Amino acid sequence: MGLRRGDSESGEESSGWGDGRACNATCRTRTSMTKKKSFIPLKFGGFKESLLHKPSHNSARIPNHSPRMWPRSLTPNKLALLFHSPKGKPLAQWVSPFQAFFSTHIVGDQPILVRDFILSALYDPKHGYFSQRSRSVGVLERSIKFNQLEGRKAYMKHLDKIYKDSDIAWFTPVELFKPWYAHGIAEAILRTTNLSVPLRIYEIGGGSGTCAKGIMDYIMLNAPPRVYNNMSYTSVEISSSLAEIQRETVGDVQSHSSRFRVERRDAADRSGWGDVQQEPCWVIMLEVLDNLPHDLIYSKDQASPWMEVWVQKQLDSGTLNELYKPLEDSLIKRCFEILDLDKSQTAQSSVISKAKSIWSKAFPKPQRCWLPTGCLKLLEVLHGVLPKMSLIASDFSYLPDVRIAGERAPLVSTKKDGRSSDYSSYLDAKGDADIFFPTDFWLLERMDHYCSGWMKPDKDQSSKRGKKRRTIMLDTSSFMEEFGLPSKTRTKDGYNPLLDDFKNTKFYLSVPTHNIK
């Protein structure tokens, strides 16, 4: 098994649960930098075939026996966990007047789409999950000296002490492995970018600034001076408190301040970006996709049409339930079109279709499918305003122990008094629970191509003359072995938590081709 956010393996119980945004934490001390590397441009077409991940449509559906990351059980036979998550009380004991109030607050007299319910449950300024947890993101005062730890047991014991000393919900990978995690990303950028033009970087959800500082440190000490002198780094951050922390973190190095700025806004809001920017740039999204709003579609059986799901409140009881409507929402329809759920049905012969219809009537099986409409909206905005952007995204490719039905279903987990437990319905998330989704990287790639204009099914076939993006998917260990310094996160006995424990996280890299005008 693998690990999941908020978990750890140890002989002792501890707490640790957090959100999934790119909430990177602060580095208060200057860290030693790596030796200079030669900058060999990364040719995507000539990249190591052993590292390439080219999933088919079916392979994107991960079976139950797939490697899993971040499980919560502390049994010895499971793979190491990064964070503690002791067994919790029954959820029924956690109901509070606040939950009932916020349920009414989210859904009024009129039904709302599932994505709007999730958006409010997570990000409502007053009652949303993230708005209430300003100290959920951990900050390490010092980098972990992995080469001074004996092995896995010593590492887990060290983590346990960190959590008890800090009383923080969780630490992000970029924080646990600072500065090396950010250095790997910086190296990937330097090897892939055109260094003859000014380097411009945008980070969506910059968290506490550890990633930004690590990347700028690396470029300052490893790239030609003109690259650092002419670079700019912009963090697009919706949280005012995190925006201030980012300025403090990056400002620890005085020369960074003139090259770094924070724009406090929603990255998915097109109006905040201004005019279209034709210059090449990089966009970084670390653990951003898992907390973006999703929509839900439903089909009562294998042959019935898909319906979009709305959330409505029963006026007499105040309870929430689902309402099903024909597919009409434009964003849902675009995502549905990209996923192409009904293409196989239309391509089937009449005999197969008839047999399927008979079977579905005899053995009806409801179907539920979660659509990453929040990701699609963000990509549409980014491609529209930054047509020559290169993209690096990292997130969960799989989540363990999901109790909610549907393909790409989320984990909905709440925590109280150091104890965490999962909900069996997303409707139970009323501002007190994290809602985070696995990323379907096959679908992410399709959405990326679609938003670039290549896959759009227009009558004008000129948009299909050539791909506008070169893409590659790497698991975290492959990415760090290629671009990072694995020796820096290795313990004395050879155990490497960055390479060994992150089995269900991936990196997605996407760069423009010559077809971009």
Image (spheres, helix red, strand yellow):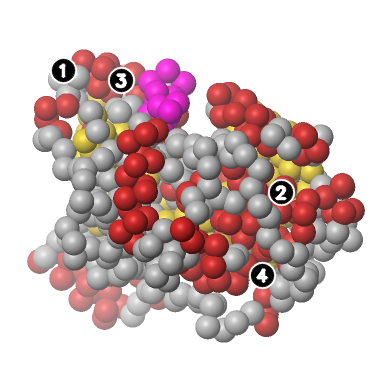
- Asked whether disc 1 touches disc 3, contact meaning CB atoms under 8 Å apart, the reply is no
Q: Badge 1 is on which residue?
A: 316
Residue 380 in percent (x, y) is at 62, 48
Q: Badge 3 is on which residue?
A: 102
First in sequence, mark 1 or 3: give its number: 3
Q: Quadrant of the C terminus?
A: bottom right
Residue 32 vertical position relative to residue 36 in the rendered view, above or below? above
First in sequence, mark 2 or 4: give its number: 2
Residue 187 in percent (x, y) is at 68, 62
* Image mark for residue 436: none
* Image mark for residue 470: 4
Picture quarter containing residue 463?
Answer: bottom right
Residue 391 vertical position relative to residue 62 in the rendered view, above or below? above
Q: Nearer the viewer, mark 1 or mark 3?
A: 3
Q: Residue at x 46, y 21 (%)?
A: 125
Residue in front for this viewpoint, 446 or 429: 429
Question: Disc 4 marks which amino acid?
Answer: Arg
Q: In the rendered structure, which segment of residues is drawn in magenta?
A: 125-136
Examine the residues drawn in magenta and state their main secondary structure: loop
